[in-house]
Amino acid sequence: MNKSTTQRAAETGTGLPQAGGFKRSLGTWSTMALGVGAMIGFGWVTLAGGWVEEAGTMGAAIAMLLGGLMMAVVALVYSELVAAMPKAGGEHNYILRAMGPRWSFIGSWAITGGYATVVMFEAVALPTAVNYVFDLNDIHLWTVNNSEVFLSWALVGSITAIIITVINIIGVKIAGNVQIFVVVFLVAVGILQIFGSATGGSRELMEPLFNGGAAGFFAVLIVVPFLFVGFDVIPQTAEEVNLPPRKTGMIAFISVFIAAAWYIMIIITVGSGLTQEQLATSTLPAADAMAHFFDSQLFGNIMVAGGIAGIVTSWNSLQMGASRLMWSLAQGGMLPKWLGTLHPKFGTPVNALLILGGMATIAPFFGHKALTWIVDAGSPLIVIAYFLVSVSFVILRVREPNMERPLHVGGRGKLGIVVGGLSVAITAFLIILYIPGMPAGITVPSWIIFGLWWLVGAVFFAGIPSGVKPGPDAEEELLEKVYAKYPHRRPSRAE
């Protein structure tokens, strides 16, 4: 029977993987920074003004609080599962054990697509942020859906995509240290924003506190999956975390509350700093509010720097997470073998990282409007995965009550199943919001991106052998069937 890197490390007593495996380099703070940084990307810089317009300052803050609580329930489910199965690939392992390989592929392919859309989003968001400070509109290339694409603008995103990919290939420890540094800077900018709002903000500008009724409230709520995606990056890198499994699970849960506090803070400070007219015309409302608080464009630029920090942390985390998912699927025989290759020196999934880096490198050349397309295509992918993980949690609680669980959400009794059922209901509700005709109905370009992702996935799905039952040995049984069907995929003795 094949053993995970975690099991091999435990047996050797070193806390480290044997040669050829992942390197355990992430401690408490780098793991926390990984989860928080993944969630706090760039969306808050560009979208906060729209949230306040749609729902009012307090309406938007309450919607975000509710969204944070909903995601916290989902994070509870993940926290127990990552503690019980601390293996790279997160969703792949949970759903495989509970529901079998085909459902595992659907959930894993969905969340991989969700991560990939965020990575591409950040590649487009970065030049948008930099353009606030420096004019990048020099050499016009083409127009995509009324969005002008300029060479310098696109190159800022593309070159950064290459740099972040190289950082991820060199090693998770370097990526983790970069993450800590950038998150600390982001927190400092947030403290400055709160101080500015307290001293230069206005209670009157926050009116109306509530706006748009239920429609305004849901307009904010529907972006929650995209904004909070990232706490689940921690399970993807579980074999690189040098912490007890229980602590790893708790960090995933706590990171959601930190992100929720950040978003609520941004909503309230933006609402207290800009008029309705300014909100309607601002491209980067969080930056404009900061400039207003201190009556200086310099401080607006500092907030843009905070936004850029958010881009880097989210981009870095989710590219890392997506590559581990692709690696895990390849290890399970669901994706081509070459995607399951680790770099011989750095121990990172180099080929998967190169694929994701290539997607991010190309994205800026589709223009600024690609931001909306990518967000709308990625959100339903994310909630599909969350739903299947939640269902898997309930199945495992019922079918395998004696499964080793270092962290028991809701205790060992039926309360845990109630928590899992609530997570199923929350994620099912979020999926319903994206059905055409519902409040979160998405545009045709976004459906095209969504459809193309599943079209590619269907090719790999068709190659998954049937007849593998869910359970603790599902991956080993799957691999034996894969190797019998595709002998060339069987690893050599050297591997």
Image: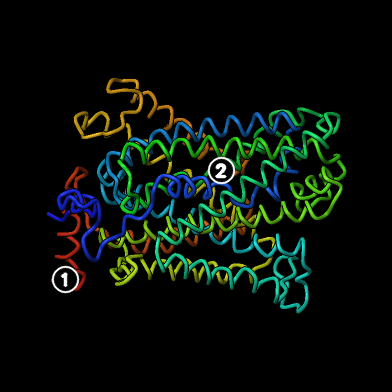
Which residue is drawn at the image coordinates 60% and 64% (left, top)? 123
Is 84 drawn above or below residue 6 in the view shown? Answer: above
Circle 1 residues within 10 Å: few <14, some 14–19, many ≥20: few
Is 316 drawn above or below residue 167 in the view shown? Answer: above
Which residue is drawn at the image coordinates 84% and 45% (left, top)? 292
Element marked by disc 2: loop
Left or right: 494 as drawn, with respect to 22: left
Left or right: 383 as drawn, with respect to 138: left
Q: Amino acid at mark 2?
A: Tyr
State the image coordinates of residue 214 (x, y, percent, origin top left). 69, 29
The image quarter containing residue 330 is: bottom left
* Residue 421 visible, this orientation: yes
* Residue 53 visible, this orientation: no
Q: Amino acid at mark 1?
A: Pro
Element marked by disc 1: helix
**Quarter of the rendering occupied by the C terminus:** bottom left
Q: Which residue is mark 2?
A: 434
**Quarter of the rendering occupied by the N terminus:** bottom left
Whole-angstrom CA distance, mark 1 to mark 2, is 41 Å
Q: Name the disc covering residue 487, or none.
A: 1
Q: Nearer the viewer, residue 225 or 275?
A: 275
User: Which one is earlier in the sequence, the residue at label 1 or at label 2?
Assistant: 2
State the image coordinates of residue 387 (x, y, percent, origin top left). 42, 39
Which residue is drawn at the image coordinates 77% and 48% (left, top)? 285
